Amino acid sequence: DNLDGRVAVITGGASGIGRAMAEAMIAQGMQVLIADIEPGQLDRTAADIGAASMVVDVTSADQVSALAAAALDRFGTVDVLCNNAGIGPMAPLAGLTLNDWRWMIDVNLWGVIHGITAFLPVLRANPRGGHIVNTASMAGLMPVPGLVPYCASKYAVIGLSEAMAEDLAVEGSDIGVSILCPGPVRSNLGTSTRNRPAHLAGALTDVQLEDSVQFEDQPVNWLSAEDTAQLVIAAIRENRRYVITHPDMLEPVEARHRAIERSFQTDLQG
Ligand code: NAI
């Protein structure tokens, strides 16, 4: 599938994985609009990589609608939507407050919901079809201590994406769906609280992955955002559902699946 000349909109595009996806897509000849809540970083990135940009808070349905309108206005169509904006702060279960849950779900889940609500009509109107990439996480495929709200948001993004893909298939739509499930990728996710609204202050804090319970007994196997972006480009071309950056993390995912499968065994049913 030739991406040359196609149009992509990427949320969380100022930094990290979003920025790298934008850069990789521009290198494929695509026209890219990046959206982000951080105006300064957004301007710098847009200028550096040659993307269009718009300041957008994905927790606002109105702002994400305005993003879709701006993309149509500027490019006439959208071919690829990357719902990528996200936050990754941590806190032990015991300290969590409702503000923590609210901030996490607002950005990581409602951000994606706002994206598909505003952009599905635009993609449906595109005679070439289209593609949606939702950024979930390896923490959407396995439970991680210290990341309860984050896991909840990312499991939800995976469920949303899988069921959405089923519905699109039933409709006979040619809109593809890919779910990006990164393991540790070098980015600014470790300073997520820089974007927390003051009224949602709570227990969530920035913890370096090296210092988290998950990586107590093993080194963190960092991947670059650029390598991650290349996997996404390939997944869009080949219309692949899951984008896995860390094949070495299969074991805990397998263990979870095995536990679920064991619970289906008929000899265990009363
Ligand atoms: P990053 O912090 O470098 O980039 C995230 C971008 O999202 C930032 O530019 C930030 O300003 C923006 N953002 C935050 N809140 C926003 C809001 N309300 N509205 C609009 N933009 C907002 O972090 P990274 O790692 O590039 O994160 C991208 C996605 O990748 C996130 O969804 C994250 O959960 C996911 N991810 C990252 C992993 C990693 O190891 N870096 C691992 C698994 C998933």
Image (cartoon, helix red, strand yellow):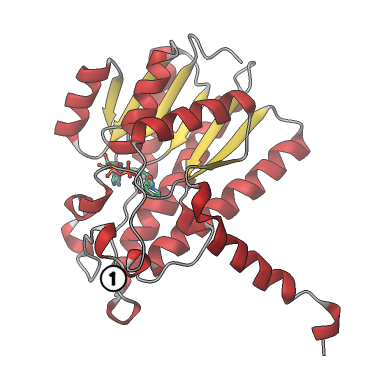
x and y, in percent, of residue 49 in the image: 27, 18
* Image mark count: 1
For the point 50% across and 14% down, which residue is it?
Answer: 6
Residue furthest toward the right?
266
x, y percent for residue 202 = 22, 69
* Residue 66 visible in the snapshot: no
Q: Is residue 252 left or right of residue 192?
A: right
Classify residue 34 by image quadrant: top left
**Secondary structure beneath label 1:** loop
Quadrant of the rendered image containing residue 174: top right
Q: Position of residue 221 (x, y in %)?
A: 37, 49
Report the residue at 31% width, 52% height from top: 87
Instruction: Identify the residue position indicated by label 1 in the image.
Output: 91
The amino acid type of the residue labelled 1 equals Ala
Which image quarter holds the N terminus? top right
Q: Residue drawn at (43%, 10%), measured in percent from left and top?
A: 29
Quarter holding ligand 1:
top left
- Place of residue 107 in the rendered image (x, y in percent of width and height, measured from the top left): 36, 51
Residue at 33%, 57% in the rendered image? 219
Is 264 above or below relative to 254?
below
Answer with left or right where residue 209 lies relative to residue 201. Answer: right
Image quadrant in which the C terminus is located: bottom right
Using the image as rendered, state which of residue 223 and residue 81 is in the foreground. Answer: 223
Against 252, is 237 above or below? Answer: above
The answer to whether residue 201 is seen in the rendering is yes
Towards the viewer: 91 or 35:
91
**Residue 38 against residue 207 in the figure, above or below:** above
- Does ligand 1 reach within 8 Å of label 1's beta carbon? no
- Return the residue nearer the eye: 60 or 248: 248
Neighbourhood count class around disc 1 (C-alpha, 10 Å): few under 14, some 14–19, many 20 upward: many
Query: Residue extending furthest bottom?
Result: 270
